[in-house]
Amino acid sequence: MDEQIDFRWRYQPCKETDIRLMRYIQSNPIRAKSDIILVAIRSFWLPHAIIANSRDKKKIQPLARNCIQSLKRQAQEISELAGLEESYGIYTTHSVCSNNSVYDDGGLSNFL
């Protein structure tokens, strides 16, 4: 098991959109701030973090597939939330790692 680390981030937004985002994250009664932020960043940055420590592409590929599926689900949720009819090529006919997720990638559907 990896050791635990303490990660702190302080952010005072200036842009109206960032202010609205931070207020929404802070006021969400169902999900903790850390959970909301991690769901949003893991799918993109986790493969970068893993590959930085290992150049074995065979080991990263299952994780990468899982992250891509998670990003697709997030894009689909955004599309549905905004009432967009375009799919932007995000819908797939099969799930690569449906229940074998390395992390909780439930996206926004768990707390909207």
Image (cartoon, rainbow, N blue to C red):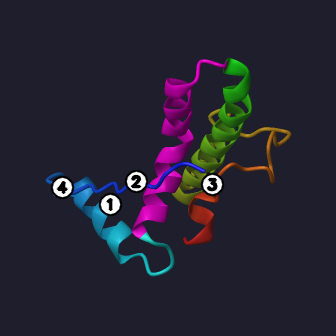
> How far apart are the two marked residues, 1 and 4, measured between alpha carbons?
9 Å
Q: Which residue is mark 2?
A: 5
- Mark 4 falls on what kind of element? loop
> How far apart are the two marked residues, 2 and 1, measured between alpha carbons?
26 Å
When the figure is inspected, residue 47 is found, relative to residue 81, above or below; the finding is above
Identify the residue at image location x=58%, y=24%.
54
The magenta region covers 33-56
The residue type indicated by label 3 comes to: Asp
Identify the residue at image location x=64%, y=53%.
103
Please give left or right for residue 49 compared with residue 5 in the image.
right
Name the disc covering residue 21, or none. Answer: 1
Which numbered disc, 3 or 2, marks the residue that appears first in the sequence?
A: 2
**Which residue of the protein is positioned furthest toward the bottom in this rendering?**
29
Are the residues tagged 4 and 3 within 8 Å (C-beta)? Answer: no
- Mark 2 falls on what kind of element? loop
The residue type indicated by label 1 comes to: Leu
Tell me the crowding category of disc 2: few under 14, some 14 to 19, or many 20 or more residues within 10 angstroms, Cα based: few
Quadrant location of residue 64? top right
Q: Which residue is mark 4?
A: 13
Please give left or right for residue 63 compared with residue 75 in the image.
right
Name the disc covering residue 105, or none. Answer: 3
